[in-house]
Structure formats: C-alpha cells, structure tokens
C-alpha cells in the first residue's frame, strides 16, 4: 500500500540562490517522495525546505546531467508546516525540476 495519489510539480528555474518550487496550503507541510533536476550548464544544485533548511540531493554536476532520488512508497522527506520546497542553485543556470509530493495535515 503506497502513500496515496501523489501530486506532481515540475518546471524550470534559472536564478542563483533559492527558488520556491511548491508551497503547501496554509497549515500543511510537504512530503517529498521523489525529486530530480536537470541543468543545462554545470552547477551545484540542491533541494531544501525553506530558505535556510538543510540541503538535500546536493551535487556539483556537469551540464545536461540528471540527478534524481526516489525515496519509495513509505519513505519521504517532510518540511515544516508552511515551509516551501525550494531548489538552490550556485549560479543562474536553466534547470528543469520535478517533485512528487503530498500535503500533510
């Protein structure tokens, strides 16, 4: 039995520093089950919850690489209540991202 029907967030960012990707509904938190990014140029990238949260899936990668992590049906990373999932880039490089998630009460 899995976690339920996951929502999918996907898009593209190109700004150095933190970019909010998904913000939970007021009073909820995000549970991330899968995340990936694919930059067009070499960059150091990582996900985090909130602007100062611990970095996860952090890599210094070459152009056109894909970094992905599937945590599985029963494992996930969860941010604090009202905390957005963010992508942090060391420089402004066009980067595609995907996140599978649920909102938790």
Image (spheres, rainbow, N blue to C red):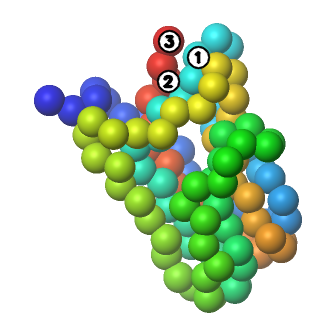
Q: Is residue 43 above or below residue 11?
A: below
The secondary element bearing badge 2 is classed as strand
CB atoms of marks 3 and 2 within 8 Å: yes
CB atoms of marks 3 and 1 within 8 Å: yes
Residue displayed at 85% across by 65% down: 16
CB atoms of marks 2 and 1 within 8 Å: yes
The span from disc 2 to disc 1 (Cα, nearest Å) is 6 Å
Mark carried by residue 28: 1
Tell me: 11 left or right of 17.
left
Q: Position of residue 66 (x, y in %)?
A: 49, 75
The secondary element bearing badge 1 is classed as loop
Q: Is residue 60 above or below residue 62?
A: above
The span from disc 3 to disc 2 (Cα, nearest Å) is 7 Å
Residue displayed at 49% across by 71% down: 67
**Residues packed near mark 2 inside 10 Å, few (<14), some (14 to 19) or many (20 plus):** some
Q: Position of residue 64 (x, y in %)?
A: 57, 85
**Residues packed near mark 3 inside 10 Å, few (<14), some (14 to 19) or many (20 plus):** few
Q: Position of residue 51 (x, y in %)?
A: 80, 42
Residue where numbered disc 3 is placed: 105
In-front residue for pair 19/50? 50
Mark nearer the N terminus (3 vs 1): 1
Residue displayed at 77% across by 75% down: 93
Q: Is residue 87 above or below residue 81?
A: below
**Residues packed near mark 1 inside 10 Å, few (<14), some (14 to 19) or many (20 plus):** some
Mark nearer the N terminus (2 vs 1): 1
The secondary element bearing badge 3 is classed as loop
Residue where numbered disc 2 is placed: 103
Tell me: 95 left or right of 31.
right
Mark carried by residue 73: none
Residue displayed at 53% across by 44% down: 9
Q: Is residue 64 visible?
A: yes
């Amino acid at each position: 039995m899995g976690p339920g029907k996951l929502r999918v967030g996907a898009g593209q960012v190109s700004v150095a520093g933190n970019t909010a990707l998904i913000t939970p509904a007021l009073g909820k938190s995000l549970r991330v089950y899968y995340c990936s990014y694919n930059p067009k140029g070499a960059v150091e990238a990582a996900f985090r919850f909130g602007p100062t949260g611990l970095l996860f899936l952090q890599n210094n990668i070459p152009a056109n690489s894909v970094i992905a992590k599937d945590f599985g049906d029963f494992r996930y990373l969860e941010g604090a209540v009202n905390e957005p999932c963010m992508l942090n880039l060391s420089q402004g490089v066009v980067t595609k991202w995907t996140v599978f998630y649920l909102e938790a009460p």
